[in-house]
Amino acid sequence: MTTKAASLLEQTIALEERFQLATYKKMPVVAERGEGAWLYASGGERYLDLYGGHAVAATGHCHPRVVSALSEQAGRLLFYSNLVYSEVRARAAEKLVRLAPAPLGKAFFCNSGTEANENAMRMARILTGRERVITFSGGFHGRTADSISATFLGKYRELGKPVVPGHIEAEFGDIESVKKLADETVAAIMLEPIQSMAGVRQGPPEFYRELREVASERGQLLIYDEVQTGVGRTGDWFFAGSEAGDGVVPDIVTLAKALGSGVPVGACLVTEGVASHIKENDLGTTFGGGMLAMAAVQATLEAIEEDGMLANVREVESHLRERLAQVPQVARVRGKGFLLGIEFKEKAAPIHQALLEQRIITGTSSDPNVLRLLPPLCLKREEIDLFMKALKAVTS
């Protein structure tokens, strides 16, 4: 790093520390630009990004189709609310719904994953006239009041106190724990089908089938929080309807993160049965469905489709699993597609730090032995080989 770059790094860190509230523990990197799976720092250093800024950079950094769509839309109209119709919003909704498994047939656009989850729970309460929601140990659903109260993951729930009443905890993967709680007061069962922050935990296919049966039998809605698993990350467009979940389709799917390639946007996909109970003014959002976000959504979905990224995820995942099987320190690999947790026989934090020093960005989790990978869906085999070379070097 040059003296000039080092000075810029120090200045930027000092300014953020002075004028911003603390959020995450930050890497000593001043991000300047990105391309594909690579992030470039202010000093010219190049980092292989296997984390995607919290699973957001689905199409890679600055995909040309997304950049072009945003630029074109910005020159026409930056924003108007849902008080008017919009062609770009209509096209984005059509594209998203047509990719979703039946009977998911309508979309509600908002700004983030936590907002999508809050609105999903609201719709369940409107439809059923009940108040309580079952969520799961290890689940994370966001940081706003209702969502963090639905979160049963260590410190995060503590941060949300006082919690919103009506949230009850079942054991992830244990259908009997659900049956004991799913009485006539319960409006919905909501879960991350793959629990990312908990260390990439996934249930067997029959668990999702049994959840569908319990919810249907007892008049409750089934909600999949696909803020991380959705939009191609698992090698399918959604976990809903996929083989990994025994083909189960819930009543509501929530989305965010990858949906806009970095432009803030969230969504709820709902069945016609749910949509028929939602009236004007039951839901609302100022910025949700804004023109820039909708241009990003449509361009993101088109880029994933036209570049064959779903097939790429499946192929590269297989290659990565083969390579990881050759690393003695790896106990097992969890998850699916490009939502993977590498479980080591030792603590993952030192490996995460050592990889960062090799200019490879990964993520940790609440499981101290699990390193998370949430890379762009365009990640290539040769980039995996670079990662594996660095991993073997830091674990040998």
Image (cartoon, rainbow, N blue to C red):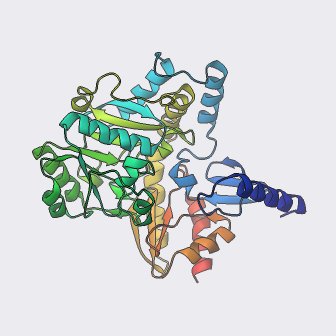
Q: Nearer the viewer, residue 90 or 281?
A: 281
Q: Is residue 231 visible?
A: no
Q: Nearer the viewer, residue 368 or 237?
A: 368
Q: Nearer the viewer, residue 98 or 144?
A: 144
- Residue 396 appears left or right of 140: right
Identified at 62% across, 46% down, the residue is 61
Identified at 66% across, 63% down, the residue is 27
Identified at 54% across, 39% down, the residue is 264
Quick check: 165 above or below 6? above
Which quarter of the image is occupied by the N terminus?
Answer: bottom right
How many numbered circles are shown? 0
Give the x, y percent position of residue 78.
61, 24
Give the x, y percent position of residue 325.
44, 74
Identified at 83% across, 62% down, the residue is 6
Give the x, y percent position of residue 212.
18, 48
Q: Is residue 217 visible?
A: yes
Give the x, y percent position of residue 329.
49, 81
- Residue 65 appears left or right of 93: right
Q: Quadrant of residue 385?
A: bottom right
